[in-house]
Image (tube, helix red, strand yellow):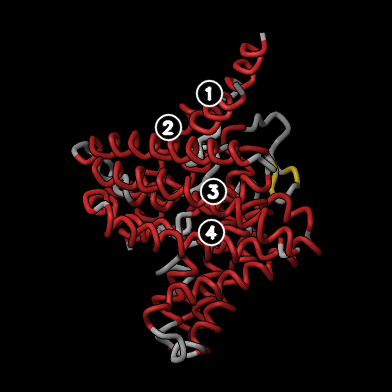
Amino acid sequence: MSLSKEFTKGLWNELPPFRLVLGLCPVLAVTKSAETGLGMGLAVIFVLTCSNMLVSSLRNVIPRKVRIASFIVIIATFVVIVELTAQAYFYPIYEKLGIFIPLIVVNCIILGRAEAFASRNGVIPSALDGLGIGTGFTLSLTVLGGIREILGNGTIFGAEIMWSSFRPFTFMVEAPGAFLSLGLLLGIMNACSKSN
Amino acid sequence: MEYIVLIISAILIKNILLAEYLGNCPFLGTSKRMDTAVGMGLSVIFVMTIATAVTYWVQYKVLNPLGLGYLQTIAFILVIAALVQFVEMFLRKFAPPLYQALGIFLPLITTNCAVLGTAILCIRREQTFPEAIVFAIASASGFTLALILLAGIRERLEISDVPKALRGTAIGLIMAGLMSLAFFGFVGVDGSLKALLQN
């Protein structure tokens, strides 16, 4: 019961980019298409779950004073694993995500979960918390990427879906579109949760 | 001459916040009031310049000769975290007024992706050392410029009638989008400037 709660809270109540408003840089940068959003999301799920598990299992060993530095080293280790794996096996997506793969290290969501949750709870709840928050993050990135790709390019996951006379709003796949669509989605989320 | 193009490009055309999407958490977090925006901006200029110089040295004098290039991410974040801590202690001891002004922003900068991002970009673009330093100062100035502009807008928004659902971060993001659209107008300026300087 409570374990499934750890997982599901990441999907709505604490949905990362919208509710926590953390880790915005990758959200804006990699959502040019649904595909890059999904790729980034999967990388974050892996790093978040693994680092949450490791932080939680070491929580009684790490001295409080150096905990932030220790968390950063743990997170950076998993980020390097993702970086090298992506470079070896998923090169096209690695190229598209570019500098934002190493920047997962400084994604505040991951450090935030390590500090706020994993350092106070057991291994299994921490793993579920990581999976849940990571899944919420992935869903948000994919949805935002999908919206921007449809409006800015007329495609979704690279497949044409709009009618033939549709003229794409190119600015949606550029920086202004990222800020505007995230801001509007955030507003819609706020409006929905208020009416509930 | 190339430096002028580099500076204009880093501040206006490829503004680190509005076009390269780096450092957005502090951008939205500290842009509610003008004084915090100025403090954050100055701290970023300070730390980013030092961090880029040190990480550049680490990459070319330590990691590359030892064949440890794959440790770049871990090495850089540790260097930046240690550096921020050191700068904080140094300022507290030797420049208390500066510490008073910047103190609370310094710990936040460790997780500012603009600092790590600039350091990695300099290496990926294979810039020379002076280019990297100029690029870091210009990027940080671009960050400060965008932050102060947004803080000015958001201070005015406090007293205007914004729809309830959009209040706070949402309207901040939309404003950032409009600013980004304005900065979009500078695209191409670097090419013309280069041509102008060559004639």
Q: Chain of mark 1?
A: B
* Nearer-N-terminus badge (2/1): 2
Residue at image location 48% in from the left, 58% down from the top: A23
Asked if both marks, 3 and 2, belong to the same chain, the answer given is yes
State the image coordinates of residue A4 (x, y, percent, origin top left).
Answer: 49, 84
- Disc marking residue B160: none
State the image coordinates of residue A129 (x, y, percent, origin top left).
Answer: 49, 79
Q: Chain of mark 2?
A: B
For this rendering, which residue is in front, B139 or A132? B139
Amino acid type at circle 4 is Ser
Could you tell me if residue B91 is visible in this image? yes
Q: Nearer the viewer, mark 1 or mark 4?
A: 1
Asked if both marks, 4 and 3, belong to the same chain, the answer given is no
Could you tell me if residue A46 is visible in this image? no
Q: Mark 2 and mark 3 in contact (Cβ < 8 Å)? A: no
Q: Mark 3 and mark 4 in contact (Cβ < 8 Å)? A: no
Dot 2 falls on a residue whose secondary structure is helix
- Disc marking residue A140: 4
- Disc marking residue B53: 3
**Residue linked to disc 2:** B179
Residue at image location 62% in from the left, 72% down from the top: A78
**Residue linked to disc 1:** B186
